[in-house]
Amino acid sequence: MASSTKQPIDPERAEENVTARILAIVTVSYALAMITASLRFYTRAVLVSSFGKDDVVMALAVLCSLVGLVTWIIGCQHGDGRHQETIDAESYAITLIMQYIQSVVTATFGFLFLKISIAMSLLRLSTGNWYRWILWGLSAFVCLYSALAFISFMTFCRPIAGMWDSNIPHHCYSKELYRNFGLFNAACNILTDVAFATLPIPIIWSLQMQRRTRIVLICILSGGYFAVALGIAKAVFIIAFVHEKDGTYEPWAPFFGYLQLNMGIIAACAPMLRPLLGRALRLSAKSTYKPYKDPNYYRAGKALDRMPRSGPNSARGYLKQNTNSGQFEVGDPRWSPVTAPRHDARGGLDLLAETDIFATIRQNKAMEKKDEITDEIVIERADPEFKLEKGIGITAG
């Protein structure tokens, strides 16, 4: 690559620069990615105590993004955002070095760690062998094209220093070939972004969650499509790389590539924040099932064996299922058992046996006012003259 020329500098072009704009956007994008990732790590490590390998790999992706931010800061101090002919040779060389580091660390290893982390997280949602094979295949594909990208960057010039120092003897392959390698890598990133954003949708929709929770999670995962849009913008500027005359003033290919990485981190980490933000957003992991029709109605009956048959707790008449632990415990005495009369075969009144009960699931509206949503299994005495109304409670027929 040739260094910047030493021609008279046009004062107007020397004053033109977009450095502040570039720095502001890349800093904000990294800050959002870092905050989202930090909340994910806190949620996984502290709240649910399940910090896994996918979180470790995601931390490596965030670290690569941090390296990218540092290179942008240094690059903007020496030439990024200004016209190439207004930059002295030494500053121009430093700018090229920073762009090279971005290509290797951010555009190669950053995306590699991001995609592998997403695949490892989705493997925990796998419902069949076909789903696991797809994820393993995508992971292998990501590793393959990332290795090819790394080799292309390392062999672009021999020696590598020839990329930023034209005074040493060197040999570099053509800009067209370099452009083709970059375009292939961008296309692979777009393809895998689409795949990782789409694959979780049918799995999440089939989970036993409230519909609102499923819709919110799918909308969050759709943030991966914003990364796809940024990747397409990056590919457009890579195509124009061959005819580029002012690469420091318009470094849009690495710029959109960096935004694509940060958007991918945000989209991958946001769904992990449900245990932390679920109460504030009123997202419950449990569904409001319809009694008599859903198999969970019968499964809930298993909890009746834990219902105290005597003593002071037996008068409370229902069990509460803890949303976090899933265990059943004696609930609030504000709901008491229903002692409903019925006629026996001779026309007399009879009281139902204590074991002649059924379970319905309803939301505790009083707890919702406290920003806490708990699913309660209410045990009430059954009677043929009683019926369910909208799956919420018992009313006389």
Image (cartoon, rainbow, N blue to C red):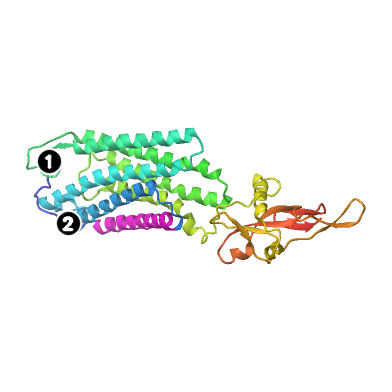
Q: Which residue is mark 1?
A: 162
Outermost residue on the front side: it is: 311
Q: Between 159 and 121, which is closer to the camera in this rendering?
A: 121
- Which range is magenta? 18-46
Q: Quadrant of the C terminus?
A: bottom right
Circle nearer the N terminus (1, 2):
2
Give the vertical position of 191 relative to 63 (above or below).
above
Q: Between 266 and 60, which is closer to the camera in this rendering?
A: 60
Report the side of 166 relative to 342 (left or right).
Answer: left
Q: Name which residue lies at 32% across and 40% down.
A: 235
Q: Give the CA separation, mark 1 to mark 2.
A: 27 Å
Q: Secondary structure at mark 1?
A: helix
Looking at the picture, how far across and down is residue 92, in whole percent? 14, 50
Residue 140 appears in the rendering: yes
Question: Mark 1: few, some, or many residues within 10 Å (few <14, many ≥20)?
Answer: some
For residue 394, the mark is: none
Report the side of 95 relative to 347 (left or right).
Answer: left
Question: Mark 2: few, some, or many residues within 10 Å (few <14, many ≥20)?
Answer: some
Q: Which residue is mark 2?
A: 14
Magenta stretch secondary structure, dominant:
helix
Tag 1: amino acid: Gly
Q: Quadrant of the N terminus?
A: top left
Residue 88 appears in the rendering: no
Magenta highlight on residue 24 = yes
Q: Name which residue lies at 57% across and 47% down.
A: 208
